[in-house]
Image (cartoon, rainbow, N blue to C red):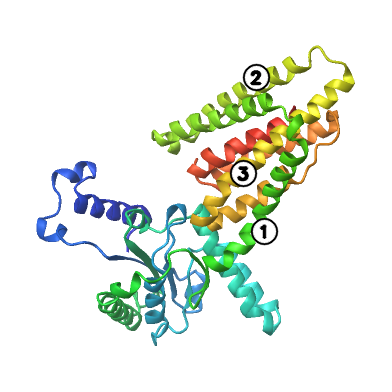
Amino acid sequence: AVGKDDLDATIHAFLGAYLGTSGEIADRPLPASFTSFMIRQVIVIDTDTQKSSDVAAKQSKPQLRILPQGRRGVLPNLDFVFALTKIFKSATMWKDARLRMYPHHEKLVQLEHWAGKHLPQKAKQYGADLLGMVGFARSLVVGPYPPHSPVLARGIDAVTIQAVFPYTASAGQYRSPLAAEFVQRLEQSIRALSNLHERLHHSVTQYLLPSPTKFVSNGEYTYPTVLVILPLAIRAASLALVDLERFSFAVALRAGVACVGVAAFIWTFAELGMVGDLSIMNTLLVLAYALTLLALTRISGGATSRMNVADEDELSRRDRRSIQFVACLLAVYVHVPMALAHVSLAIVSALFWTPVLAFPTYKGGKRGALQKMLAGAFLFVSWPPVWVVPNAFPEYTMYVTSVYVPLHLLLMSLWLF
């Protein structure tokens, strides 16, 4: 067993050596006899031991996880995953191990134990499946990503198998029957996969796994995803049909261009390799938001400088509804393809943005001081440098820079101006 960083480095080094395109490894690629064949599947083995103080060690139960998750919602072929789960679930020595399909998360494990003790008998299986699907979706959105994820990014089916063996201080070693059967199951997996690829390409690569024996396909989770996004489309359509003649297209266009331009600016720096340095990204975001606030202030102030109160309130309402149309349209535009490729992120994102963008009507005039204070507090808490990064997301991902930032800027222009 090696540390996670060492295992990740090993996978990157293997891919670099195989492809001959990984910096220092490029000067010494693998021989042609190794690289002339196409890689069909990759299985990454990650083993560890439990210390004697761990609860699981005291119960003398091993832990087994089969992790298919990759970055940006990429998953391997479902037949590949189920072939491995079927092989390992039939193991005799591992029958007491709880097979999970998501990385270790202490709170989810505690919730599983609580549900197993307190839920009624008929609801226990449903609760376990629900928590399993939450853990699976969570790891797709925010990680931690298993070490095979760079292989998935290359279009190669890959899975990480994590096995934690009980450790006894007296023996000072792995329990040999468990380790022997684990290696035996790995051998069976390799033999099975060598003859399985012809059937694998008929399966699906978009799914959610509540348990090792159940899956939710894209044909099933599409309907709730559409229902969550639907209010955004309805609000955009209603605004276009009712207020189209009174739209402030100039204001909406300027606000939209400013917000999308800021997102493009942040995304460019993220793609240049600065995404890992949070201090630089946060500084750029502060500068970008300051420039956007200045631009929105000039747009709002220039249009109302020579109007009476009634006309100013009507213009403010009209401007906000115009910007709301642009925000809802942009939200639909970015969430529909996201739902087709990364449903775990699409549902969570739509549940956050739909209420704040689609539900308000903006029929009144300007907002009062208290409303602006509450709106400012919400916008500050939801501002990426305050909590979103690195608490919800470990870094400035493509979603944060390309989706979250422009929608947050449009929401700021709706609530503060």
Is there CB contact under 8 Å for labels 3 and 2?
Answer: no
Quadrant occupied by the N terminus: bottom left
Identity of the amino acid at label 3?
A: Ala
Residue 376 in view of the camera: no
Quadrant occupied by the C terminus: top right
Q: Mark 2 or mark 3, which is nearer the start of the sequence?
A: 2
Q: Is residue 56 toward the left or the right of residue 320 in the image? A: left
Q: Is residue 175 toward the left or the right of residue 258 in the image? A: left
Estimate the x, y position of residue 87 in percent, counting from the top left.
37, 81
Q: Is residue 359 toward the left or the right of residue 94 in the image? A: right
- What residue is shown at x 63% (from left), y 51% (from top)? 350
Identity of the amino acid at label 1?
A: Leu
The residue tagged with tag 2: helix, strand or loop? helix
Residue hosting label 3: 331
- What residue is shown at x 74% (from left), y 36% (from top)? 377
Residue hosting label 2: 294
C-alpha separation, residue under disc 1 versus residue under disc 2: 37 Å
Query: Which of pointers 3 and 2 indicates the residue nearer the eye?
Result: 3
Q: Which quadrant of the structure image shows residue 128?
A: bottom right
Is there CB contact under 8 Å for labels 1 and 3?
Answer: no
The residue tagged with tag 3: helix, strand or loop? helix
Estimate the x, y position of residue 370 in percent, counting from the top left.
85, 32
Mark 1 crowd level (few <14, some 14–19, many ≥20, 10 Å Cα): few
Residue hosting label 1: 227
* Viewer-nearest residue: 220 or 101: 220
Q: Mark 2 or mark 1, which is nearer the start of the sequence?
A: 1
Residue ranking furthest to the top: 306
C-alpha separation, residue under disc 1 versus residue under disc 3: 14 Å
Q: Mark 3 or mark 1, which is nearer the start of the sequence?
A: 1
* Viewer-nearest residue: 256 or 295: 256
